[in-house]
Image (cartoon, rainbow, N blue to C red):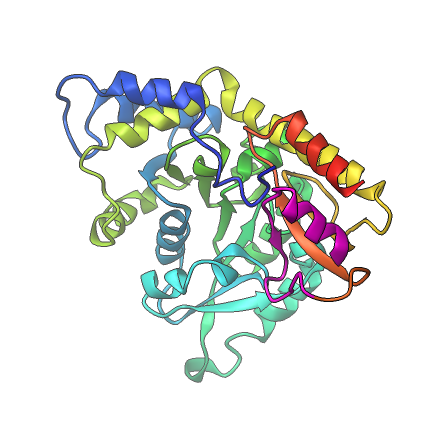
Amino acid sequence: MDFASDNTSGVAPQVMAALNAANEGHVPSYGADALSEAVRTKMRDLFEAPEAAVYLVATGTAANALSCALLTEPWGAIFCHRNAHIEEDECGAPEFYTNGAKLVLVDGAHAKMDPEALERSIAHTGRGGIHNVQRGMVSLTNATEAGTVYAPEEVARLTEIAQDYALPVHMDGARFANALARLGCTPAELTWKAGVDVLSFGGTKNGCMGVEAVVIFDPARAREFELRRKRGGHLFSKNRFLAAQMLGYLAGGGWLENARHANRMALRLAAGILEVDGGSLLHPTEANAVFARLPRGLHRQAVEAGAYYYLWPFDQSLDGPDDELLSARLVCSWATTDDEVDSFLETLA
């Protein structure tokens, strides 16, 4: 009953098989191998973007931070939701890689930026001229840190505001597959067709060992990203092993099926929690994360039975009155089973 994170799951069989197959012979290094070229072709086809530049890195933090560095200057503002991953979980990496850009936090329900709040924030920034941080870029997260998703029209509304101020847009897609599985649209419709300039395309949380792709829809930015990736220490010499993971992940649409499964498990879990006495949801369950509120006694009961998940926020304690409501985050993955979900719900019941 492990719902701590989709990072705690293992490597999907098709990805492991691709890694094993890549572990033969000698091939050119630093992305000059056939597998890396195949990834570039595959991703361009997937996104209907034949000119897109595609680069692989090992972590989501690297993908996001390097993307931000590509899109804004050190004196720029990065407009993002106050619960965005780049704000809450990356230890200042975007600020570090941009050499000082400032995250400007935007409000909105369920971790989704409110368009009016974004416009107010952009309009307010830089009014003091050289004395202020300048307008830099917009970054949005899909699926969000609250387990919700932006539909293509919602993405387009935010990018239109950014474009009104000539600002580029980055999408943190660590759980892009989960968002796509929920929406049923195409990758292109959720990204460049809706105005996104650069996508961090996640693999690690959805069955890979450790690989993310940065998809740059404007090839004119490619050379700078190459230099930033190398200078930042994220150019792998044995790039074939990143490429092999990504190819195994994408083969036969397995990446989307993994995400659909994780989403189904989350919906099953959320529905069961709503049937528990005192159970409620903090956010709509639209991807693979469930944010729930339960009495402390039930949390304690679940943990004692072997359930692993996080109280959210972390500063809550299992010590105290049984009837006090505590909130928690439970995340499902490609490897979550019906039995795990059912066992957890039975424990609560």
Which residue is nearer to you in this view: 96 or 209?
209
- In percent of width and height, residue 284 lies at 75, 46
Q: Where, quadrant-wise, is the N terminus in this rendering?
A: top right
* 303 to 333, vertically: above or below: below
- In percent of width and height, residue 100 lies at 36, 70
* 133 to 331, vertically: above or below: below
* 271 to 233, vertically: above or below: above
Picture quadrant of residue 95: bottom left
Q: Is residue 154 left or right of residue 308?
A: right
Image point 41% across, 81% down: which residue? 130
In magenta, the rendered stretch is 296-319
Can see residue 306? yes
- In percent of width and height, residue 241 lies at 27, 29
User: Residue 316 lies in magenta, yes or no?
Assistant: yes
User: Residue 6 lies in magenta, yes or no?
Assistant: no
Q: Is residue 71 left or right of residue 25?
A: right
Image point 40% across, 51% down: which residue? 61
Can see residue 183? no
